[in-house]
Amino acid sequence: MAKRRPRLRILFDENLSPKVAQALRVLGFNVSHVGHDGDGAPPRGATDEEVLSFAKQTNQVVATSNHDMIMLAAEAGASVIWIDPRGRQFDLDQLAALCFGRIVEWHDLFEKSDGSVCIRALRTKSEVLELEDAARLARRRLRSLRNRKKARRPKKPLGPLVEDDPGGPT
């Protein structure tokens, strides 16, 4: 029995590989990506606001791993798919396997949801989050990433406590 193709329309953000979006499109899924010339998608380098606005106008759901996009989607009340690597970025093969294996599940989760939600795709499962919960988690994750970056910065030496005065008494 052939697997059904979901009606879900997905716009891959530019932080996800366009190769995965292209492969899904070749397989008959309704997928595009930022920078795709064939369907008027926003160009690479477009702001998150422009990407989200385009997705809403064309009835697409943005797929992203960008924390800022998750928070923006929550503000706008727009559904989003959060590809959440939880600290270890997906390589191309992992991202492809995740998307190919879950796209029908994502469609079903959106169909069962009341209103706009965030589908959070983790390595082993997908879950539905309310947009505010997703935004709260994204903000917490961003704070944690910033704190880790600060902790990794090398400390600057304080320098000598007393400066030598070459012209002073000895």
Image (spheres, rainbow, N blue to C red):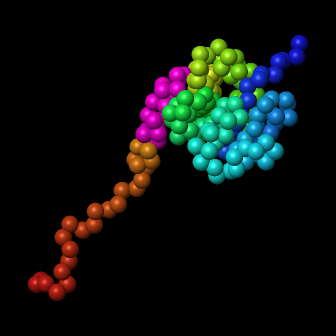
List the single residue furthest toward the front.
57
Q: Residue visible at 62% across and 39% down?
A: 53
What is the span of residues highlighted in magenta in the rendered image? 129-145
Would you say the magenta stretch is mainly helix, strand or loop?
A: helix
Q: How many marks?
A: 0
Image position of 9 with respect to 168: above or below? above
79 left or right of 9 in image: left
Q: Nearer the viewer, residue 79 or 105?
A: 79
Q: Nearer the viewer, residue 164 or 133?
A: 133
List the single residue furthest toward the right.
1
Q: Position of residue 14 (x, y in %)?
A: 67, 44
Q: Is residue 138 visible?
A: yes
169 left or right of 163 in image: left
The quadrant where residue 127 appears: top right
Q: Residue visible at 80% across and 39% down?
A: 22
Residue 136 forms part of the magenta stretch? yes
Q: Nearer the viewer, residue 20 or 170?
A: 20
Image position of 98 with respect to 22: above or below? above
Q: Position of residue 27 (x, y in %)?
A: 85, 30
Q: Is residue 20 visible?
A: no
Residue 151 forms part of the magenta stretch? no
Position of the N terminus, as image quadrant, is top right
Q: Position of residue 70 (x, y in %)?
A: 55, 34
Q: Residue visible at 58% across and 23% down?
A: 117
Q: Residue visible at 65% across and 34% down?
A: 56
Position of the C terminus, as image quadrant, is bottom left
The quadrant where residue 115 appears: top right
List the single residue furthest toward the bottom.
167
